[in-house]
Amino acid sequence: EVQLVESGGTLVQPGGSLRLSCAVSGFTFSNFGMSWVRQAPGKGLEWVSAIGGGGGYTFYADSVQGRFTISRDNSKNTLYLQMNSLRVEDTAVYYCAKDTKAIGGHEFDFWGQGALVTVSS
Amino acid sequence: EIVMTQSPATLSVSPGERVTLSCRASQSVTNMFAWYQQKPGQAPRLLIYDASTRATGFPDRFSGSGSGTEFTLTISSLQSEDFAVYYCQQYYDWPLTFGGGTKVEIK
């Protein structure tokens, strides 16, 4: 059974930093690209960042470019999102999502339950 | 950036009715297009990919069609468990983008 479990969501002040983790099981992690997708309270879905199965390429939304860093540890079956210089508008539930292809940038066939990040003073 | 526009924003429907949701892309995405279903408090679930292929676990009352810039999701006979928000997504180009969603609610 495929499982994705996010952790690390919390309340953080504007300008602060946070690292989210997504522990996966049930599939060969290194064979698939992964993404982070966020959803602000009461709003729609926004893709944030993607990484290839081998970690060799990464992509970012303009809204987080230069502030967020996606990475993965295939030996630990874990995906990460390092978030720096957080803004109030980064407040959202952050989902990790499994891509259907190794290179990423496709549809997402499995999602985690989400981690709530609240940026507020 | 490819902008995805969904219509309508909200659809009030009675159980058993046929439902058609639309999504338009600001430029062609060929068939690199997906639909997701999201229920309150839950993560999205992949419903349709490659514009018309139904994902595992969804019954055949759900169907997707279209290519290029115009796409449609049809639910042939709405069941109580189908009331949810539906999102479209293109994966033709970076950044990956989603539509704003269509909420299907009980009439």
Image: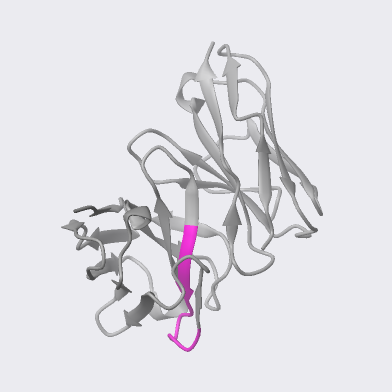
**x and y, in percent, of residue A114 in the image:** 31, 52
Toward the viewer: B80 or A81?
A81
Toward the viewer: B34 or A1?
B34
Vertical arrangement, residue B37 with respect to residue A86, above or below: above
**x and y, in percent, of residue B4 in the image:** 67, 49
**x and y, in percent, of residue B66 in the image:** 79, 46
Name the quadrant containing residue A68. Answer: bottom left
Q: Quadrant of the N terminus of chain A?
A: bottom left
For the point 75% across and 57% down, which residue is it?
Answer: B31
For the point 44% across and 86% down, which residue is it?
Answer: A54
Count of numbered badges drawn on the protein:
0
Q: Read off the magenta span.
A: A47-57
For the point 21% across and 58% down, which residue is it?
Answer: A9
Q: Is residue A93 left or right of residue A16?
A: right
Q: Is residue B10 left or right of residue A58?
A: right
For the question of whether residue B49 can be seen, the reply is: no
Name the quadrant containing residue B77. Answer: top right
Asked whether A52 falls inside the magenta stretch, the response is yes
